Image (cartoon, grey):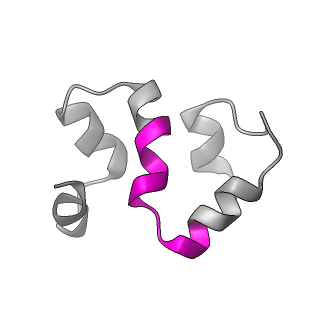
Amino acid sequence: MVRPILESGCSYSTVIRLARGDSYVMANYLPVCLDPAIRIWLTSLLEASITSWGDLKGSS
């Protein structure tokens, strides 16, 4: 359900908040929505290097 909404131009955080999710939901559901290469990058980060949604949005 999230992928078609995201493809329509809505941001990930908007979709989660519309579904009454919070930052915890955003963080836990994110890996499911990622392309495999990005998921590999995310899982290769040091533990606790990203501690908030803001950290994730600002990382590259």
- 18 relative to 42, above or below: above
Question: Where is residue 47 drawn, in percent x and y?
Answer: 80, 38
Task: Judge from the rendering whether residue 22 lies leftward or rightward of residue 48; answer left or right.
Answer: left
Residue at 76 percent of width and 58 percent of height: 44
Prevailing secondary structure of the magenta residues: helix
**Residue 34 lies in the magenta-colored region:** yes
- 23 relative to 47, above or below: above
Residue 18 picture quarter: top left
Residue sitting nearer the eye, 39 or 58: 39
Magenta stretch bounds: 27-38
Q: Quadrant of the N terminus?
A: bottom left
Question: Where is residue 19 drawn, in percent x and y?
Answer: 18, 33
Residue at 34 percent of width and 50 percent of height: 12
Residue sitting nearer the eye, 28 or 9: 28
Q: Quadrant of the C terminus?
A: bottom right
Question: Where is residue 54 drawn, in percent x and y?
Answer: 58, 36
Task: Judge from the rendering whether residue 56 lies leftward or rightward of residue 21; answer left or right.
Answer: right
Residue at 21 percent of width and 25 percent of height: 20
